[in-house]
Amino acid sequence: MINIRYHVYSLVAVFLALAIGVAVGSTVVQRSVVDNLRSTQGRIEQNLDDLEAQNAALQERTAALDSRSGSLTEEGPGALLTGALTSVPIMVIWTQGVSADSLGQVQNALDAAGADTVAEVELQAALADPEALVAFAPELGLPEDERSPEQVQAAIGEQLADLVAAAHAERTGPPPLLDPVVSDTAPTTDAPVSVAARELAEFLQLLDDAGLASVRGTLGEPGVTTDHLELAVVGGLTRDLDPMPVLGPLLESLATDPRPMAVATDAGLEQPLGEGEEAYGVVAAVRNDGQIRDRVSTVDDVDDFAGLGALVLSLAGLTDGQVGHYGLGDGADALLPTGRS
């Protein structure tokens, strides 16, 4: 017969065995988990080390590429674009807010190519001011019922296009020699003033006087040739003014001429965009307009040598009637124009 003491001892032994088993098992499991976590941590740390090394290598490579790109942008035009636009008269239009560095690079490339930049026109933010536009309407000869801000913007663009096309088409021959029989004055060798160029210069001065544009250059002066005047539009990206209400009608009107005479491109901003701000450009607008696209060349941007080269070569190709779209953005045909025919 089993007494009660034996029964109690048996129960105590069972529970003690269970307790020892739980404790031992817990220790084994904890060691396994810890070992596994340590192994995982080691792999993660190794992966992080590898990623940091790769990132450092990529940063070094990016810095080297940026340095090469900067050197090519600075030195490339003089080495590779010389003579591409020798004596070709160029008018450059851009919008307030475009990076001064980008504009400087454009001018350096045009100078290296031998172009004669006869006019530089910066469209001002006042072109979006309804009061300034309505005040300028009489200069355009618009009827009273056609002087809304939108109509004035379009009229400015269209009149600019007409004057640019006239200067492009005008031929200026040598000045007439004075007849020595009827005059004692010595024959002059100064080239005559282009009538169309003078009219274009006068209209640009009206825009300048009204605060709608800032204009500089030799356009309209004696001896300044403007036949085959080509137009370089560096219209964006800019946050200060949407240029398309003016540049759209300008380019659309030029697109009706059988001779292409304009290249549109976008450039960087003078200051980075803030939250909620929008950048305006011209390239996408031109490429998305079937009529303009067929008559106006475009370049994605002019912030590197590829863009500058495409701009210069596109301007040079206008003489042969070549039109194309260059860069890496949507709607581009190639990075650079092909050889001229």
Image: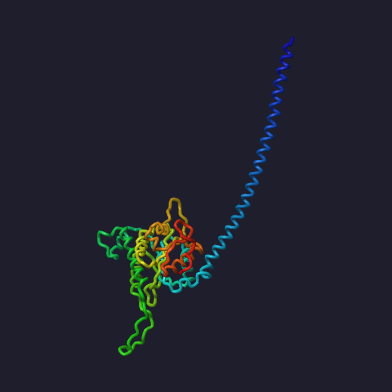
Q: Nearer the viewer, residue 51 or 258?
A: 258
Q: Is residue 142 visible?
A: yes
Q: Nearer the viewer, residue 290 or 153?
A: 290
Could you tell me which residue is drawn at 29 percent across and 62 percent down?
137
- Residue lying farthest to the top in this orientation: 1
Q: Is residue 205 visible?
A: no
- Residue lying farthest to the front in this orientation: 341
* Colour scheme shown: rainbow
Could you tell me which residue is drawn at 61 percent across and 55 percent down?
57
Where is residue 271 drawn, in percent x and y?
Answer: 46, 58
**Dividing the image into 4 quarters, which one contains the N terminus?**
top right
**Dividing the image into 4 quarters, which one contains the C terminus?**
bottom left
Q: How many marks?
A: 0
Residue 227 vs 29, above or below: the answer is below
* Apparent side of residue 65 relative to residue 159 in the rendered image (left or right): right
Q: Nearer the viewer, residue 130 or 340?
A: 340
Residue 26 vs 253, above or below: the answer is above
- Residue lying farthest to the bottom in this orientation: 181
Could you tell me which residue is drawn at 59 percent across and 55 percent down?
58
Residue 38 vs 100, above or below: the answer is above
Where is residue 3 drawn, in percent x and y?
Answer: 73, 11
Where is residue 188 drawn, in percent x and y?
Answer: 37, 84
Query: In which image quadrant can residue 248 be found?
Result: bottom left
Query: In which image quadrant can residue 16 be found?
Result: top right
Residue 197 vs 330, above or below: the answer is below
Where is residue 165 drawn, in percent x and y?
Answer: 35, 68
Q: Nearer the viewer, residue 131 or 22?
A: 22
